[in-house]
Each structure stands twice: as C-alpha cells, then as structure tokens.
Amino acid sequence: MKTITEDIKTVLFDEQTVRRRVAEMGAEITRDYPDHSEDLILIGILKGAVVFMADLIREIERPVYIDFMSVSSYGKGKAESRGVVRILKDLDEDILNKHVLLVEDIVDSGLTLSYLSDIMVRRGAKSVKIASLLNKAERRVNIVKIDYCGFPVPNEFIVGYGLDYSETYRHLTYIGALKESVYK
C-alpha cells in the first residue's frame, strides 16, 4: 500500500523553516500596524489558508479580528484554475474603515486576490494588504502586490501545511511538490 509521503516529489520547506518564516511575517505585520486603536481584520481564504492563518495570528503582537471567505477558481480534483472566481462563503464581519489583511496560502495566477482586493476596496476597507505563505510568480496573470510573502515556489503543484490536492495532503507539516503522476 502506497503512503502519502510517496506522492511527494520533493520537500521544499521543512516544518522548522516554515515556522521560522511565519514568526518573521507576524513580526513584520506587528511592526506595520502599531496603532492598536485602529481595527485590523485578517481574512483567511478557505480552506488552504487555515493552517497558515492560525499560526500567523499567534505571531502578531496586537489585537486582530479574524474572518473567512471561501472562494473557488478550481474545480474539485483540478490542478488548473478555470480563471473564474466564485464566492462560496462571504464575510460575517463589516470591514468598513478597517485595515484588511487578506491571508492566502498561495498566490498563483493572481486572479483570486486581485478580485478579492477590489471587493474589499469597494466595501470601504481603510487599507487592503496581502499576506501569502507562498508566491508562484511564474504563473502570474494579474499583477498582485504581496505585502507579506513567506516563500517563492517553483511552478509545480504544491501541497502541505494547509495546501491540498483534491482535499488531501493539508495535514503535512512541511511544504512539498507533488509528483506529477498524482494529479495528471
């Protein structure tokens, strides 16, 4: 019987490296939002950003609100974005006059975050920034500024630490590239 780890072509970032970088990102965010009287809301993009966001908020040394959105540009079991972003779950919190930090697992084409950033501005956010654990710049279609970036990654299918393929591999404590034979 094959194990999940046999599906991993290579480990890109081990658990300690990921934890260290998330702590650094939390410190950067703390530094950039020193006024605790202004609301900062972190919006996690479900499901992939959950693990990253849970660790990130513990590294931010100031009060934060959290909320979640669920969007889709991939179909179940698909490895390529369809290019159409659909909101599956919208915010529960009002973001009017709040600083918004969109928290994403990976920026690929940039379509989703470009779309969501525009929505946050239209809803009256005081500011909108992006924190992404991973940046796959090679696949960028829309220009998106990542204000807090964990790691650049190659143009491969990335899993682990919240990132999945067909709802599998999210539980891995490291970030790895999936063997092509798994998703093609």
Image (cartoon, rainbow, N blue to C red):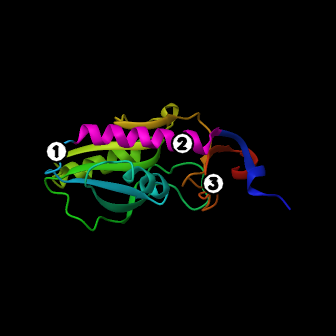
Circle number at residue 172:
3
Which residue does the image show at 23% across and 42% down from the upper left? 33
- The kind of residue on which mark 2 rests is Val
Labels 1 and 2 touching (C-beta < 8 A)? no
Q: What distance separates the C-alpha of mark 1 from that of mark 2?
A: 28 Å
| Mark 3 element type | loop
| Furthest-front residue in this view | 61
- The kind of residue on which mark 3 rests is Leu
Q: Looking at the image, is mark 3 or mark 1 nearer the viewer?
A: 1
Q: Looking at the image, is mark 2 or mark 3 earlier in the sequence?
A: 2
Q: Looking at the image, is mark 1 or mark 2 earlier in the sequence?
A: 2
Residue 156 x/y as whole percent: 62, 39
Instruction: Please rate how many residues cluster around mark 3, counting C-alpha atoms within 10 Å: few if below 14, some from 14 to 19, many from 20.
Output: some
Q: What distance separates the C-alpha of mark 3 from that of mark 1?
A: 36 Å
Which residue does the image show at 51% across and 49% down from the upper left? 81
Q: Classify residue 34 as left or right of residue 50.
A: left
Quadrant position of residue 15: top right
Instruction: Please rate how many residues cluster around mark 2, counting C-alpha atoms within 10 Å: few if below 14, some from 14 to 19, many from 20.
Output: many
Q: Which residues are magenta?
A: 12-33
The residue beneath circle 2 is: 18
Which of the image's four quarters has the N terminus?
bottom right
Which residue does the image show at 26% across and 47% down from the upper left? 118
The residue beneath circle 1 is: 35
Task: Specify the principal SS of the magenta part.
Answer: helix
Tell me: residue 75, above or below residue 82. Answer: below
